[in-house]
Image (spheres, rainbow, N blue to C red):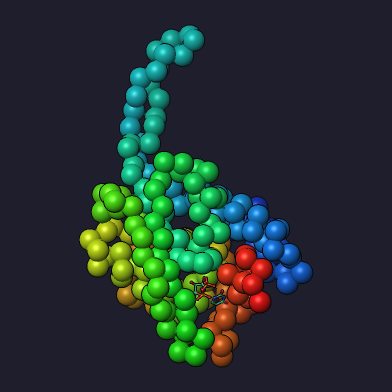
Amino acid sequence: MGRLHVCDHPLIQHKVTFLRDKNTETKQFRELVDEIATLMAYEATRDFPLETIRVETPVIEADGKVIAGRMVGLIPILRAGLGMVDGVLKLLPSARVGHIGLYRDEVTLQPVEYYVSLPTDVTERELIVLDPMLATGGSANAAISILKGRGCRPTKLMCLIAAPEGLKAVQEAHPDIDIFVAALDSHLNEHGYIVPGLGDAGDRLYGTK
Ligand code: PRP
Ligand code: URA
C-alpha cells in the first residue's frame, strides 16, 4: 500500500488557510501554491539516497554527502498542476517536466484526456505527479495509468488538498505510489468538490470564472 504523508508543517498549514479563503485573489493564490509546493518538495525528497564524496575544506579534506544521481521528472496534470511546477523546480532544478492534460467532465466527474507530452528520457526517470486537488481520484489515477502504460515509473503523487474518497481510490488502484498531501479534508459534496476544500483550483489559479 502506498504511504500517505500529510505534510503538516506549521508554515504549510498557515499557507493552506489563506489558500482556502475565498477572499484570496489570484496573484496571492498563485504565490501560495508555489510556496507550498516548495515546502512539500522538501518532504517528498526526504528518501533520496545519498553518496559520499571527498571535498577539501579550507582546513582539511573531509567526506560530504551528495544526492546520488537521482533522475527526476515532474508531471503536472493540466491545468492546475502547472501551478506547482516552479515551486518544486526550486529544489529540483534539473528535473525534466512532462505534461498530462485532463479535465473532469462536470456531469460524470470522469477524467477526459486531451494532451500528453513527456520528456524523451522519461522512462529513465522517477516521476512525481503534481495536482493541487485529489477529489474522486479519477484524474490522478488516469495520469498514473497513462504513465505506467508508456513504461514509465511514477513513484509519488503530490497534492495540496485531498478528500478521503480520492485518497482511497488512488491507494486501491496504484498501491505502489506514495501520496503527499498538505491537508486531508472531510468529504466530497454532491458536485464532487472537496469540503471544505478551496473551490476550483484551476479557476482560482488562472482567474477563470
Ligand atoms: C481539477 C483538479 C484535478 C481534478 C481533481 O481539475 O486540478 O485535476 O479536478 O478531481 P478528481 O480527483 O475528481 O479527478 P479540473 O478537471 O477542474 O481541470 P483544470 O485543472 O483544467 O481546471
Ligand atoms: N477540482 C477542484 O479544483 N476542486 C475540487 O474541490 C474538486 C476538484
> Which of the two residues, 102 or 37, is positioned nearer the viewer here?
102
Query: In the rendered view of the protein, which quadrant contains the C terminus?
Result: bottom right
Q: Is residue 58 visible?
A: yes
> From this viewpoint, which residue is outermost toward the left?
151
Residue sitting at x 40%, y 46%? 95
> Which of the two residues, 179 or 90, is positioned nearer the viewer here?
90
> Which of the two residues, 177 or 202, is positioned nearer the viewer here?
202
Is residue 33 left or right of 41 when viewed as pictured? right
Q: Residue 133 placed where, x, y %?
A: 52, 70
Residue 186: quadrant of the picture: bottom right
Q: Residue 1 placed where, x, y %?
A: 33, 67
Residue 112: quadrant of the picture: bottom left
Residue sitting at x 45%, y 65%? 77
Is residue 145 left or right of 195 when viewed as pictured? left
Residue sitting at x 63%, y 75%? 199
- State the count of labels: 0
> From this viewpoint, which residue is outermost toward the top?
59
Residue 142: quadrant of the picture: bottom left
Residue sitting at x 29%, y 51%? 120
Q: Residue 141 placed where, x, y %?
A: 37, 73
Q: Is residue 171 visible?
A: no
Is residue 174 left or right of 184 when viewed as pictured? left
> From this viewpoint, which residue is outermost toward the right?
23
Q: Residue 111 placed where, x, y %?
A: 42, 79
Q: Is residue 136 above or below residue 121?
A: below
